[in-house]
Image: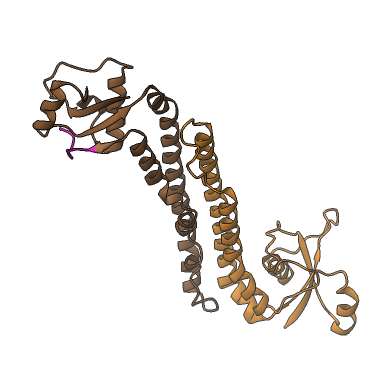
Chain colours: A brown, B orange
């Protein structure tokens, strides 16, 4: 198991992580778990047992810490991206479904509202994709998955920071 | 008021309801009440000329009877047809919406199942979504269908899911 601290990379720093290295992946994980808005190469991963790491903590420079094993590194590379993509696709499908139904129901509501014989009933009161999916717990997918990742990587936030411009 | 008997039109009968006629209207009304959303001329309607004789002898074969007055005919043209169309559009939207969600749910469940460390995450229940969308479909059609059945005094001679 290796523990890393993730710090911001100075804009003028010529140092970058080697493509495919553990440090590069650590920065990707940190970006994801921090919801860091900039690219992951704005970050640097440093082993926690180094002097630079101690210095970064003293300077209050570190964003977060996380722990990596070869297995959890593989998990990130092989599983996490796929599941994250699936969650994102699901959210998109849900948004799209709500849009499609909202539009159709608004038309039907209007037809009811304008009628003489059917007034008083609002179809959209009884049909809601959002509430159906909420009951299934699908609204918590992202949260639950993120929590599982936090535990797996023993992720700890040390300082909140927005991306540099 | 005219009462119509509505029959299942056999595909090879060569008969169709006259466009714009009350017979066509009675067939459409039966279609709405049945909630089966069948194509035009799936049903064919005939007025009961002599209620005492024709009704008793033909109702064995008929699927529905429908009563139409000038007033309710006007209501059909001015309001209900549009409402039925909008309800069908909701049904179509439900189909489209559910299709996208099903695919995404299956992709998510597969991703969890194929992973080495996330099998414990709860997979999404396709059955629960099935039930939710089935309920939506019934709800979107039910209100219109029930009202139409009432306004046109529709009698159903077979068990339809009315």
Decide which of B69, B126 is in the foreground and name it. Answer: B126
B126 left or right of A147 in image = right
Percent position (x, y) of residue B49?
Answer: 84, 80
| Total count of labels | 0
Residue A78 in the figure: left or right of residue A31? right
Q: Quadrant of the C terminus of chain A?
A: top left
Q: Main secondary structure of the magenta part?
A: loop
Name which residue lies at 87% across and 69% down: B61
Magenta highlight on residue A160: yes
Q: Indicate the position of residue A108 as horizontal and vertical percent values.
A: 50, 65
Please state the extent of the stretch shown in magenta in the rendering: A157-165
Nearest the eye: B97 or A11: A11
Where on the picture, by quarter, is residue B24? bottom right
Which image quarter holds the N terminus of chain A? top left
> Residue A151, image x and y in percent?
35, 38
Q: Is residue A73 magenta?
A: no
Answer above or below: position of B119 versus B84: above
């Amino acid at each position: 198991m290796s523990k890393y601290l993730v710090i911001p990379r100075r804009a003028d720093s010529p140092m970058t992580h080697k493509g495919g290295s553990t440090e590069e992946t650590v920065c990707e994980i940190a970006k994801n778990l921090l919801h860091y808005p900039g690219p992951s190469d704005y970050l640097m991963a440093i082993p926690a047992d180094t002097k630079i790491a101690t210095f970064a903590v003293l300077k209050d420079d570190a964003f977060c810490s996380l722990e990596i094993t070869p297995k959890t590194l593989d998990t990130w590379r092989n599983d996490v991206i796929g599941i994250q993509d699936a969650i994102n696709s699901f959210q998109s499908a849900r948004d799209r479904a709500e849009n499609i139904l909202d539009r159709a129901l608004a038309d039907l509501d209007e037809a009811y509202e304008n009628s003489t014989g059917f007034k008083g009933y609002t179809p959209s009161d009884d049909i809601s994709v959002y509430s159906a999916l909420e009951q299934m717990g699908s609204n918590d997918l992202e949260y639950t998955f993120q929590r599982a990742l936090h535990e797996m990587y023993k992720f700890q936030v040390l300082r909140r920071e927005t991306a540099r411009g | 008021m005219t009462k119509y008997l509505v029959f299942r039109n056999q595909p090879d009968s060569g008969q169709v309801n006259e466009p714009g006629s009350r017979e066509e209207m009675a067939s459409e009304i039966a279609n709405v009440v049945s909630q089966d959303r069948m194509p035009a001329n799936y049903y064919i309607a005939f007025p009961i000329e002599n209620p005492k004789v024709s009704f008793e002898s033909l109702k064995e074969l008929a699927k529905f009877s429908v009563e139409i007055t000038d007033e309710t005919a006007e209501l059909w043209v001015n309001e209900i047809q549009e409402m039925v169309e909008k309800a069908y559009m909701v049904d179509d939207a439900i189909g489209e919406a559910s299709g996208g969600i099903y695919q995404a749910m299956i992709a998510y469940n597969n991703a969890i199942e194929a992973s080495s460390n996330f099998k414990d995450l709860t997979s999404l229940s396709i059955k629960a979504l099935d039930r939710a969308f089935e309920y939506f479909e019934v709800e979107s059609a039910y209100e219109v269908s029930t009202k139409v059945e009432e306004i046109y005094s529709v009698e159903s001679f077979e068990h339809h899911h009315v």
